[in-house]
Image (tube, rainbow, N blue to C red):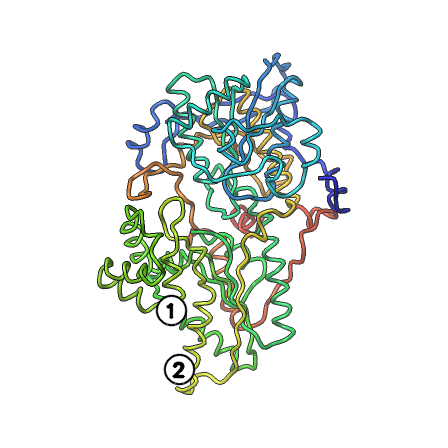
């Protein structure tokens, strides 16, 4: 990192605001035993050694800190990148050094593969200082390899023993922390003296509960997207001739779309969870959007913005049935990827139920082919490869032609389509994420210090000043349930979807009709790193609505 922008140089001097409770000696206060969110008997059977552990809350103590033994810790960045990962590692490093300057931190390279293949480097102060408050995961790299096999655990144990590592911190999302829970259980069951701690990472926002108010990276990514959406809205309001269909990353849950909607106030903002709750069809969605277009055109406004969540089609009931059938059908078809595109399409049609085959055949050819592309690591349809935004724009265009013929539309329609995904993954973290991530890492060091294993680092109260945040941890098994993966039921962390009864969605629902009718665009502008707290340190809007009564 020899070449640095002026912002990087100034950003290196930023000192994250650590919660007061983590400054100095702490004591761990144990809460009541816990249980999983669902399938308690199954999860307890699979995790007999780590299930039911108590919640942990850290409190300041005036007692002198007891001498801390020298501890070597390993860290893994797992899964897709999210802004703030470097600050988690910085906080972990500083927390370990505060406990004992002789403590060492080792980074395993390119994700879980580094642990299995014994590829690592010691993270020293010089290295850490180069990456403070920066975006990306390039300090040690990341990867998506799953840690779920005994052979992997045993290969990992060899290098952990060689480096005298007694704790491993896995920074990742729901899949990565599911793996962390499995690894913690295996090591504890086999008396391997290695703790495993998780940190909640995903820009998708679906790693969420009462102890994880938001996953790190969500704030920065949504602010990056909201800036660009605002720029498009400004262009929209200037040229006054385009409808922009903007798909936003989010895999399954619509948290990113909801947050960006609250920040920018588009004319249409689709929330997948509402589509499912209302049992809406694709035609229902198209008709709703076309009506908004027609109503605005009647008042001379032939322009607008539509936000589309990445996982939308999975929430349309007929599509969900189709996708579930395809996932099950192709789970054991190992040679499917070797078929040509037309052969794949014909194979799928011939093996679907009549209803699903009809849905599949009515899709635009480009979309049906996208649904037959190679599976993801779980054997499921890669929804991010389906160009939902283009499909909706084209179907709305066709519906408007029909409405014009019926005398129900008299305007001009020209569509532009966009997909914002990786643009937000590696941005320099906002002040909120810089502080939050540093606290998560520092807090993870204290979880190591108190002997916890199979725990997730937790920092709460995030709408308050960061000095007042509450720190602690909770068992990862609390978040788990049983789901079908590759045609088998397996324990996984349950995804948190948008809650239609919660205040963020209700606030959005109360305003969206006005947004559709009028032009109420908000232009958030770029992330601000320097200036007053009300400009630089604000949490996500969804957190604001969840934790305030305004």
Asked if residue 62 lies left or right of residue 275, the reply is right
User: Callout 2: helix, strand or loop?
Assistant: helix
Q: Residue at x 47, y 58 (%)?
A: 309
Q: Is residue 219 left or right of residue 158?
A: right
Q: CA–CA distance between discs 2 and 1?
A: 18 Å
In the picture, the disc for residue 380 is: none
Q: Quadrant of the N terminus?
A: top right
Side of 358 relative to 141 (left or right): left
**At x 73% / y 42%, what residue is drawn?**
11
* Residue 36, quarter of picture: top left
First in sequence: mark 2 or mark 1? 1
Reply above or below: 473 against 216. above
Which residue is more in the foreground, 410 or 357?
357
Secondary structure beneath label 1: loop
Kindly identify the residue that appears in the image at 37 percent across and 20 percent down: 189
Residue 30 lies, with reference to residue 418, above or below; the image says: above
Say which quarter of the image contains residue 84.
top right
The residue under the point 33% across, 43% down is 485
Q: What x and y, as percent, mark residue 121? A: 60, 27
Among the 4 quarters of the image, the one containing residue 384:
bottom left
Classed neighbour count for the residue bearing mark 1: other residues with Cα under 10 Å, few (<14), some (14–19), many (≥20): few
Residue 352 screen position, x and y as percent: 24, 59
What residue is shown with label 1? 364
Q: Position of residue 4 (x, y in %)?
A: 74, 44
The mark closer to the camera, 2 or 1, is: 1
Please tell me which residue lies in front, 408 or 119: 119
Residue where numbered disc 2 is placed: 402
Q: Is residue 151 above or below residue 146?
A: above
């Amino acid at each position: 990192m020899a070449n640095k922008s002026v912002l990087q140089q100034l950003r290196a001097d930023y000192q994250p605001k650590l919660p007061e409770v983590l400054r100095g000696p702490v004591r761990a206060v144990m809460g009541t035993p816990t249980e999983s969110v669902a399938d308690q008997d199954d999860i307890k059977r699979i995790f007999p050694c780590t299930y039911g552990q108590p919640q942990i809350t850290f409190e300041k103590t005036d007692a002198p800190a007891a001498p801390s033994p020298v501890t070597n810790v390993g860290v893994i960045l797992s899964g897709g990148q999210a802004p703030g990962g470097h600050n988690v590692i910085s906080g972990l490093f500083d927390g370990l050094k505060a406990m004992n300057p002789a403590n060492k931190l080792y980074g395993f390279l390119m994700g879980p593969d580094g642990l299995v293949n014994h590829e690592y480097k010691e993270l020293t102060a010089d290295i850490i200082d180069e990456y403070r408050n920066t975006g990306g995961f390039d300090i040690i790299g990341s990867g998506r390899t799953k840690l779920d096999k005994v052979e992997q655990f045993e290969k990992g144990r060899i290098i952990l023993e060689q480096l005298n590592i007694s704790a491993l911190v896995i920074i990742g999302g729901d899949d990565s922390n599911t793996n962390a829970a499995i690894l913690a259980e295996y090591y504890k069951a086999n008396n391997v003296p290695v703790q495993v701690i998780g940190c909640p990472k995903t820009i998708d926002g679906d790693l969420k509960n009462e102890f994880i108010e938001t996953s790190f990276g969500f704030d920065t990514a949504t602010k990056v997207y909201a800036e660009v959406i605002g720029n498009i809205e400004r262009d929209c309001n200037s040229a006054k001739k385009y409808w922009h269909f903007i798909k936003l990353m989010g895999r399954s849950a619509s948290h990113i779309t909801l947050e960006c909607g609250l920040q920018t106030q588009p004319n249409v903002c689709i929330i997948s969870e509402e589509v499912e709750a209302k049992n809406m069809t694709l035609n229902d969605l198209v008709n709703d959007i076309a009506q908004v277009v027609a109503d605005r055109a009647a008042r001379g406004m032939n322009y607008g913005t539509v936000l589309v969540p990445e996982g939308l089609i999975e929430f349309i009931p007929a599509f969900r049935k189709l996708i579930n059938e395809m996932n099950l059908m192709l789970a054991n078809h190992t040679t499917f990827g070797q078929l040509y595109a037309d052969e794949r399409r014909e194979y799928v049609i011939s093996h679907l139920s009549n209803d699903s085959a009809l849905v599949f055949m009515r899709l635009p050819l480009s979309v049906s082919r996208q649904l037959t592309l190679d599976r993801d690591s779980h054997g499921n349809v890669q929804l991010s490869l389906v160009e939902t935004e283009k499909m909706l724009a084209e179907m709305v265009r066709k519906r408007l032609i029909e409405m014009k013929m019926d005398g129900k539309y008299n305007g001009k329609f020209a569509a532009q389509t966009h997909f914002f995904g990786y643009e937000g993954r590696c941005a320099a973290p906002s002040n909120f994420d810089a502080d939050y991530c540093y606290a998560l890492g520092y807090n993870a060091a204290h979880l190591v210090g108190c002997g916890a294993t199979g725990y997730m680092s937790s920092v709460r109260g995030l709408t308050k000043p960061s000095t007042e945040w509450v720190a602690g941890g909770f068992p990862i098994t609390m978040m788990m349930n049983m789901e079908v993966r590759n045609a088998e039921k397996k324990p996984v962390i349950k995804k948190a979807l948008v809650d239609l009864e919660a205040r963020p969605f209700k606030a959005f629902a109360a305003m969206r009709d006005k947004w559709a009718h009028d032009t109420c665009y908000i232009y958030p502008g770029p992330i601000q790193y320097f200036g007053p707290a009300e400009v630089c340190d604000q949490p996500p809007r969804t957190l604001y609505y969840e934790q305030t009564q305004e």
